Every structure is written in C-alpha cells, then in structure tokens.
Image (cartoon, rainbow, N blue to C red):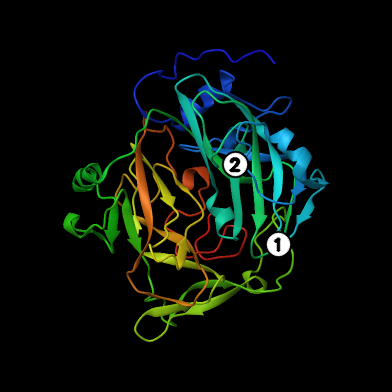
C-alpha cells in the first residue's frame, strides 16, 4: 500500500484529543486503514474509533511485549494454536489470545494513539489490551507509529464466543499531551460541573483530586439493598455474537450490602458496582477511567476506559450527570469497602475541537443516564440498544 496522504483539516499543532469528525478525516487521509476491508462509519464515536477483530485468533502460552522485535516474530515462539474466527469461536477462561485487528495505523509525526477496552467488554470481565510492534507498553501507541494492531484478549470470568468484526476495544488519537492537572479540573468544575450529587454539583472544595478526580462507591443500593452484581462460577458460554439481550441470571448474582452500607469483597471475585456521584463530560473534554490500586494493594477497580464528550451531559439541562459502572476485584484477601469510598479515578483531556455529535441517545449510546451496571449484552433497565 502506498503511504498515507495528508489532510489539511487535521491540525498539525496544538494539543488535544481528535473528535469524531477528525477521525473521519484521518481515515480518508490513510492514517487509519483496514486494507481490503472498509471501516464502518458507525464505528466512529465522538472521540474514539471502535476496532474490529480480524479473521484469526492465536492462542498463546503467555502474555508478552515485543520490545525491539515485531509481534509476528514473537508469535513464532509463543503460539499454541490458531483459531478461525470467521464462523465464530470460543475463547476459554484464563487463557490469553492474540488477535490481529482489521485496522492498521500509519500515523504522521506528531499524532499518537491510545487504546482501551469498551465499557461493554469490561463489564463482562474480559481483559483486553493492544500490543504493537517494537513496543514496551500496552495500549500506548507511539507518536508516528506505522504498523499493525494486535489485541490481547483474556476472558476472566466467562468463556466467550467471538467472531470476526466484533468490537471489544477502542482507539483515541491525540496531538501533544492535553491532560488537565488538578488545578485545571477545579477551574473547569467551577464553570461547568464535572460531578453531581443528586441534582447539585459537588462543591469544589469537596472534590477528591490527585492527578485526576476520584469517584466513590454507591453502597446504599436500591430499596432491597441491592448494590450491583457478582460473576457466577461455572456459567454457560457467553455468546457475544448473539442477537438480542441475554438473561443475566445465568451469569451474574445480585449483591446486597451489609448493615452500615458496606460490603466485603471475596478474593479474586468480579463485581459490578456503581458510583455514588454522577459524571458529566462537557463537549470540550474527554475523560478516561484509570485503574486504581490503593497503596496497600488489596483492590483493583475499573478495567475499561474511555468516557466520550457528552457522557452525562445534556445541553438542555434535562438531566445532570450519569453514574459510572465500576468493575471491581479484590486481590488476595477479603476486603471491606464502604459507601462513598474512593475506588476509581477519572482523568480529563482537552479536545482538539468539540465533536459534531456528542455521546448520547442520538447515536445509540448504551450507558447514558444508566441505572444498571450490566453490559449491553444483557437485559437491563434503561438500555437504549441491545
């Protein structure tokens, strides 16, 4: 293939995350391409691009980073089996697989990328991360990278059925380092609230900040004390290609709080819980939920990733914020968590330009104003698409 062209509509200076309209320009310019496959327009989101599984999965004996080598050269050492995804195939719990994605990158100097699992992927406890040639980091894609993208996939709770063209992760493109520091976050929150408690903005002096904005848990729960779900053991095959929403009962058990609005997490069990406060991401910002490990190391929260501009934001003011679903797992010992405890962190980045279309129901977004933690693959209250 000839090298990519140039697109004058994408600025080569400044700093910020590229909105959907610039991602479309990047596709037309050849910065992102899929060879003989066409990139579906609906895969372009307000500040990210859904990436598709290719035709073949490779079962590998261990995870790896290629360092100074290519991924293909490393696979010669680590491949156990090849699996055809064109008719769908099962991926087993606890086994790592590597899948070459259909999309490839030909980034010009100054343009870098980052990948993250889609929220629907994290909510079914499927661990994913992108591997690129000659790299020593997962998900971080170097400035000016030219090459293939590979997705490591590890089902952690359920055996899953996947197939060609399924989208499990997303890509963001950015120029420069547009991250907001804690002073920036306070200033933005004063102008345009980022966090709501009920219908009122959280007072600025009550924000918990440390290189990002911390969110606390909702362990009040509903009228029955239900605060979320935990993954069932020995569940049936979870078919991600199945049309229509699945009954969650075979896969998840409801979780009820203890007296005092607290919960003891069992070691290595997967929980879906909800944030107490509601997040609002204005059009000129993008956010990312980052994994948070307390210094003591007992807990890990949130494996998925991007919050696009417009999440929890309504220009008309009909609602204020959307709560975040949190994927939580204790490590080696039972761990007590309490209502309001800070367990995850949002970082914010400037957009290069506001997206023409925001996250929300107009583009079939699944988690706007969500009241449930379950993935879109399951029947749940308030879903806008299955």
**Quarter of the image with the N terminus in it:** top right
Q: Which residue lies at the image location 55% right of the left edge and 38% below the top edge?
A: 136
In the image, residue 101 sits, relative to residue 240, either above or below, namely above
Left-right relation of 215 to 248: left
Rendering coords of residue 166 (x, y %): 68, 45
Count the marks: how many?
2
Residue 3: quarter of image? top right
Determine which residue is flagged by label 2. 130
On residue 379, the disc is none
Q: Earlier in the sequence, mark 2 or mark 1?
A: 1
User: Which residue occupies the foreground of this view, 236 or 46?
Assistant: 236
Rendering coords of residue 218 (x, y %): 37, 70
Q: CA distance from mark 2 to mark 1?
A: 19 Å
Rendering coords of residue 29 (x, y %): 56, 18
Q: Residues within 10 Å of mark 2 (few under 14, many from 20)?
A: many
Q: Is there CB contact under 8 Å for labels 2 and 1?
A: no
User: Which residue occupies the foreground of this view, 187 or 81?
Assistant: 81
Left-right relation of 41 to 349: right
Q: Which residue lies at the image location 45% right of the left edge and 68% below the top edge?
A: 298
Left-right relation of 101 to 175: right
Q: Secondary structure at mark 2?
A: strand
In the image, residue 370 sits, relative to residue 17, either above or below, namely below
In the image, residue 208 sits, relative to residue 147, either above or below, namely below
Q: Is residue 126 visible?
A: yes
Q: Residues within 10 Å of mark 1 (few under 14, many from 20)?
A: some
On residue 93, the disc is 1
Q: Is residue 318 visible?
A: no
Left-right relation of 362 to 283: right
Outermost residue to the bottom: 259
Q: Which residue lies at the image location 54% right of the left edge and 77% below the top edge?
A: 254
Rendering coords of residue 318 (x, y %): 32, 53
User: Which residue occupies the foreground of this view, 19 or 211?
Assistant: 211
């Amino acid at each position: 293939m000839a090298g990519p062209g140039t697109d004058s509509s994408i600025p080569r200076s400044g700093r910020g995350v590229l909105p959907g309209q610039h991602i479309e320009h990047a596709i037309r310019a050849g910065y992102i391409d899929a060879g003989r496959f066409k990139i579906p327009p609906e895969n372009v989101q307000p500040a990210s691009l859904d990436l598709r599984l290719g035709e073949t999965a490779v079962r590998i004996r261990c995870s790896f980073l290629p360092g100074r080598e290519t991924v293909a050269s490393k696979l010669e050492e680590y491949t156990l089996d090849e699996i055809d995804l064109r008719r769908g195939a099962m991926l087993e719990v606890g086994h790592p697989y590597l899948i070459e994605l259909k999309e490839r990158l030909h980034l010009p100097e100054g343009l870098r990328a980052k990948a993250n699992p889609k929220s629907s992927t994290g909510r079914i406890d499927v661990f994913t991360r992108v591997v690129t040639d000659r790299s020593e980091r997962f998900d971080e894609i170097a400035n000016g990278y030219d090459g293939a993208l590979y997705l490591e996939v590890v089902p952690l709770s359920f055996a899953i059925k996947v197939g060609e063209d399924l989208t499990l992760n997303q890509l963001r493109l950015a120029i420069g380092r547009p991250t907001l520091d804690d002073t920036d976050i306070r200033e933005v929150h004063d102008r345009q609230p980022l966090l709501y408690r009920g219908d009122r903005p959280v007072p600025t002096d009550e924000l918990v900040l440390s290189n990002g904005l911390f969110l606390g848990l909702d362990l009040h729960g509903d009228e029955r004390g239900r605060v979320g779900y935990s993954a069932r053991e020995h569940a049936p095959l979870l078919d991600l290609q199945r049309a229509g929403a699945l009954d969650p009962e075979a896969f998840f058990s409801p979780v009820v709080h203890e007296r005092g609005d607290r919960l003891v997490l069992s070691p290595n069990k997967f929980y879906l819980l909800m944030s107490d406060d509601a997040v609002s991401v204005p059009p000129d910002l993008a956010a990312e939920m980052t994994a948070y490990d307390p210094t003591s190391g007992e807990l890990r929260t949130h494996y998925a990733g991007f919050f696009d501009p417009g999440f929890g934001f309504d220009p008309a003011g009909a609602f204020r914020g959307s709560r975040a679903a949190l994927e939580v797992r204790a490590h080696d010992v039972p761990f007590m968590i309490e209502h309001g405890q800070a367990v995850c962190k949002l970082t914010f980045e400037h957009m290069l330009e506001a997206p023409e279309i925001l996250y929300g129901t107009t583009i079939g977004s699944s988690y706007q104003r969500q009241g449930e933690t379950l993935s879109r693959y399951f029947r749940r209250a308030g879903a806008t698409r299955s």
